Image (cartoon, helix red, strand yellow):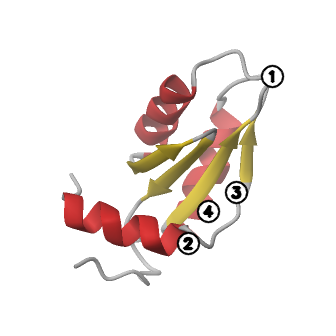
Amino acid sequence: MLTGKQKRFLRSKAHHLDPIFQVGKGGVNENMIKQIADALEARELLKVSVLQNCDEDKNVVAQQLAEGTKAEIVQIIGNTIVLYKESVENKQIILP
């Protein structure tokens, strides 16, 4: 689990990022989880945008993505979810 201090640090890092995935009408699926897991391995920190036409609640979507990719939810702000997962081979972010 992330501490408050680590979450604050990650939120400041994520502030400048653009969402690279969108969850729409279809909701969360296996393929999306795999792609996000791969992107997390490469980047460690990313944003996912929940579109207006998504049938599921953004908190449910965040939970599904976090469980599927074994990532941490840093923040849910508006319709944007910020996820963090420490990279195995490509570690860039050093947590405080």
Q: Which mark is residue 43?
A: 2
Circles 4 and 2 in contact, beta carbons < 8 Å: yes
Q: Residue at x 64, y 48 (%)?
A: 48
Name the outermost residue toward the front: 78
Which three-letter amino acid code belongs to the residue tagged 4? Ala
Dot 4 alpha-carbon crowd within 10 angstroms: few under 14, some 14 to 19, many 20 or more: some
Rounded to the nearest angstrom, the CA distance separating label 1 from label 3 is 17 Å
Rounded to the nearest whole Å, what is the CA distance between mark 1 and mark 4?
24 Å
Q: Is residue 67 left or right of residue 31?
A: left
The residue at which mark 3 appears reads as 19
Element type at mark 3: loop
Residue found at x 60% / y 55%? 47
Q: Residues within 10 Å of mark 1 (few under 14, many from 20)?
A: few
Nearest to viewer (mark 1 / mark 4):
1
Q: Position of residue 66 (x, y in %)?
A: 44, 41
Q: Earlier in the sequence, mark 2 or mark 3?
A: 3
Q: Amino acid at mark 2?
A: Arg
As drawn, the label of residue 53 is: 1
